[in-house]
Every structure is written in structure tokens, then in C-alpha cells.
Image (cartoon, rainbow, N blue to C red):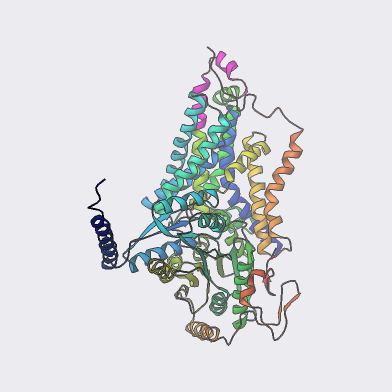
Amino acid sequence: MSELLLVSIMIGAIQSGTPLLYATLSETIGERVGIINLGLEGIMLIGAVVGFVITVLTGNAALGVVAAALAGALFNMIFAFLVITRRANQLACGLALMFCGVGLSALIGAPFIGRQIEGLNAIKIPVFSDLPFFGRAFFQHDILVYLAIPTAVVIWWFLFKTRWGLSLRAVGENPTAAFAAGKNPYLLQYQVLFISGLLGGIAGAHLSLALAHNWAEWMTAGRGFFAVALVIFAKWHPLRAIAGALLFGGAISLQLQMQARGVPVSSFILDMLPYVLSLTVLVIWGRTSRSAVPGSLGRVFQGTE
Amino acid sequence: MKRRKRSIPKQLVILISLIFIMGMSFSAVAQGQEKLKVGIIHIGSINDAGYNQAHSDGVQAMKRNLPNVEVLQAENVPEGADAERVMENMIKQGAKLIIPASFGYLDPALRVAKKYPGVKFVHPGGYRLAPNLSTYWASTPEAFYLMGIAAGKTTKTNKAGYVVALPISFFLANINAFHLGARSVNPKFETRVVFMGTFLDAPKEAIAASALLDMGVDVLGVIVDSPITVVQAAEKRGAYSVGYHYLGAQKFAPKGWISGVAFTWGELYTRFARQVMDGTWKSEGLFGNLTSDYLTIAPFGPAVPPGAIKLVNDTKQEFIAGKKNVFQGPLKDNKGVERVKAGEAFPLTGIGKMDWLVEGIIGQSK
């Protein structure tokens, strides 16, 4: 019985943690290059709706995911233009992007509500999926789940093991110095925000194509903001983001599991669990490492003229 | 000033205006009825196969019944000041009947109603009236009891799970009724409840649904705005489902569909519009039941045994005849406290005060 519970919680944690992980990675690389993007929620919504619409129209969920990623990236280019080229305030632009995404996604999705899709279904990995416990918990998921952790590793590798990643982090710490060293901060920021948009779009696609198999307005329900907090939890590190996303995904899933099992705790208290967890983490993290924050996060690079 | 023309114009004016007035009233009679504009605002999307689509289909049916009616419709209107603005805008476009189709529109609607006493308002599920604001809804526990009978006869694992937005009294009463109905035909039946904390979070509903299915339930019920996610999740894993709000939800579960409690507002909205047009509209609180044309038991799916359908219909007649109570004592809640004494029944008009879950339901009522 308790083994079954553990498996269920694990499955739930992985399922609800996956979109959080993609979203957190999206925000992490953006913040690493010095740009805080509160519009992530809007990007995810655009990804979710475009992924759903393309899947309805073509019947091909893989195409849906690709379209979602591209749509997220293009949508993020609006934000990039505002904060990089127009040097506008990042927080204000992010919030504007979020609300724009909410409205635009509702508009695009309205004619498609209630359409049925096959979506992304679980792929059983041969041999491994038959293992007791581990089989069901880890080897019977959809393709985006299997790709999530490799994506985190690839991003980690790019950030910390390549020259491109080094220049990117240099821009995030001090764009003027990076500029003096011969890097083009604008170009790097555009590149990173494009990739960040791709990841945000995929996060949304997982919600609509794999979890819900359905599109509903504002279906992200705050997950984009959750990811912004998770970046702090993960101290701007892509590999720690894996643990963070699983932990928070687990907290969401655990409270539903506890209710389904009839644990005698109020659903209102259980509902607070993920948020209490994030507050606790921020309190504990708060005093320790300040060095993790990219030095010029949120500041606008004014050029060097 | 010349005075000789004095007497002529005065009589002439009276005569002309008399003819004019008579002509106007004749032309109004000749046209039959004036055109009526009806404004409806929705909290969500009208294609949600749930709460909002039920209302939207209602006004569409009204439009078919009454060709003189024109409908102004607005979707995704947030509760609060936005709702007020949209309603006022509709009134400025000439709407004489407003349907603020969400519980949370009550306060904005009351404010707008006060400002425009000539416009009529009908609000669903409310508990307050104004001289120009009516309220309407239907008592659903009896219908949920019937769903419970069908589910109790169809299930193979004797377990059902409910995905519910919030633990508010009306929902608790529906789940209690469902469970009592199922227990009446299947004493081993158990019902598990998971509360979402929100009316709209499809990914979370999907995870809750699989958490319940992992517990071995093979019937999923749902009380959120759109049933699509949960009903589809049940179908995918070969479980049965019970719908709420909208008749058309069946298409998402062709195999596992049991039935559903649905609102069919068309005839009621037609009556409202007709009353406004012929001036007989009055402020009232309508609270329908199984005999009302706006509370419907959805068609049964292929999995429901014929005997169960007959039992549902027989029990429905008992309810209509007043021979049976949903909450017939003795009833204990799921913490062991006696809630209804033997020989007594919890009145359906009092379910607004129901803050407990009946014995055998696994879940927390607050």
C-alpha cells in the first residue's frame, strides 16, 4: 500500500514537475544574461494554446510541441525588443507580456475549446517499464518528461562549459565589461531570450498536450510565477532546478494524493503546501549566498557611448 | 397679435396628436411585439462543455423560440467592476433583460440594477432579490442521488472519486446525495473527494483524476467549470464518468459515460424574455427541481445496465411524488457525528447550511 503511495506521488511529482522544470530553465538562462522576465506565464500560455491548436489541426502532437516552442520564442521576441532595443523596464514589460499572453492565448484558443486530441501519451520504455516500483514511477511517461532532465543538463553544459555560456554569464554579471572584452551584449541577450522562449513554449505545451489533453483559458494558473520563484530556489543553476521542480511538483501532487487517500487535514491547508515550502526555502536561502544572483539582473544595459 | 386663428390651432393640435398617438399604438400592435435585446455575460468560455456552455445554449434556444429577440453576449468577463461596465455597455446598446451568468456577478448586478430600474435582471444561483432582479437555479441533490444509483449499479470496484472545485455547501450536498444514492443500491460503495481550490486548473484536475484512479476508483465525477479534462482522463484509463452542468459532455467519453446532471435553460430564458416583452415580468426567486424543464438527467451511456436505468426512473418518480427524501435520517457525517436523527429528513431548502460529508465519504469538508 505504501509502495503504491510512493509510486503515485513520484508519478505526480514528475508529471507536474516537468512543465515547472522547462519553465524554470527558461527563466534561469534569461536571468543569467541579466534579464528578469515576469512574462513567462504569458509565454507558457502562448505555447499551450499554439501547441493545442496545431495538434488539433494536424493531428500530430510532435508538430504541436515544435510549433509551441517557436510560438513561445517569437512571442518572447516582443519582450526582447522592448527591454533590449528599446531599453524599457523589465518588470513592467514582463507584466505587460504576461497579460498580453493571457488575452492573446484566449483569443487564439476560443474556437478550439472542447476539441479532442490524442496529445502526448505515455511511452513505455521496454524492459525498464516492467521493473517493480521504478517501472511505473520513471519509465511510463510522455516524451517531454524523458527530455526534461537531458535539457537541463545540456543547458548546464552550455552555460558552464562553453565560451558562449561564459560570455552569456559575463553579460549577466556586467554587460559593460563584457562589451569591453569584445562581446555584443545585445546579440547575446536576443539569442538567450529566443531560447528562453522556446523552453517556455514547451512548458506550456506539456500542460495542454500531455497533462490536460485540453485547452482552457489561463490554464497555467500561476505556474509561470512559480518558476520565477524556483529560479531563486535553484540559485540560478539548471541542475538544482531539477531538484526544485521535482520537489515543488511533488508538493502539488502530494496534497492531491493526501486528499484522495483521505488524510484528515483540511484541503485549504494542503493547498498551501507548495507555497509554504517556497516561503520556507526563501527564508532559509535568504541569508546565505548572495553571490548566486547575476550582478546586473534587472538592470538595463545603456550601451557605452 | 391676431386672435382670430386662436380656436383652430388648439383643436387641430389636439386632434393631430390624438391621431398620432393612436397611430403609434396601432403600429406597435401591428408589429406584434417590440424587438427585445437580451444581454448575457459569461465568466468563462462558451465552449467549455460545462457551466458556461449550458447558459449559452440556453440563450441560443431562446433566440430560436423568439425571432424578435436579439442577444448580446460577452465571454470571460471578470467578476467585479469589469462585469459592471460590460452590463452598462449592453444596457446602453438597448438591452432590456440582462443575464449575469455567474454566481459572483451578484453584487455587480445589484449595483447596475439599482442604477437602471427599467432594465430587468435574472441571476443564477443567487440568494438575493431586487425590484428588478430575479434569481433562478434548481435544487440538484435529488438528481445527484439518481446519478449515485446509476454509478453504484455500474461500478466494478465499488469506488468513486469526485474532483470538486471547493468545499462549499451546495457541492457538499451534491456529493453527499451522490454517495447516498450509490449506497442505496450498493452498500460497499465508497466515494473519495479531492478539492481543487479553484474552478479552473486543468493540469491540476488531470493529476487529481489520476491520483483518484490510482486509488482504484472506476467512476469519476466532476464539479468544476469545465468537465472535459476529468471526463477525458477517466475515458483514457477505462473508467466511468458522471457529468455536471452540460448535456453535451458525453461526447468526451463515448464508452465510459454513465450520465450527468445538466441544466437546460432554453425554455426558462424564453419565458423570461416573453415576460419582459409583454410586461408581466416580476421579481421572484425560482428554485426548480426534477419536474422543472431546466434540470435534466443526461442520456445514459452504454455501460449502464438497463435495470439501473429503470431504478433511476422509478426513484425519480418517487422524488417527484414527494414519497422519498434524499437526506433521510438517521445520517452520520464521516467523523461519526450524528447529523440527521432517525425519522427526520434534512430539508433540501436548507442545504446552504450543509458543511459536512456523509459517512462513507473519504474527504475533508473544511
Q: Quadrant of the N terminus of chain A?
A: bottom right
- Magenta stretch, main secondary structure, is helix
How far from the left and from the top, in percent, is residue A16? 59, 51
Specify the quadrant of the image occupied by residue B365: bottom right
Q: Quadrant of residue A269?
A: bottom right
The image position of residue A81, as x and y in percent, is: 47, 28
Above/below status of A227 relative to A193: below
Q: Quadrant of residue B11?
A: bottom left
Of A145 and B350, the residue lying toward us: B350
- Give the side of residue A113 with respect to residue A236, left or right: left
- Residue A267 seen in the current view: yes
Q: Residue furthest top?
A: A305
Whether residue A123 appears in this view of the structure is no
Residue at the image point whose x is 58% and y is 29% from the top: A159
Q: Position of residue B59 (x, y in %)?
A: 40, 63
Q: Residue at x 69, y 44 (%)?
A: A278
**Residue A100 against residue B317 in the figure, above or below:** above
* Percent of width and height locating residue B216: 61, 68
Q: Is residue A224 left or right of residue B59?
A: right
Observer-nearest residue: B18 or B114?
B18
The stretch drawn in magenta includes residue B351: no
Q: Which range is magenta?
A: A173-193
Indicate yes or no whether the magenta region holds residue A187. Answer: yes
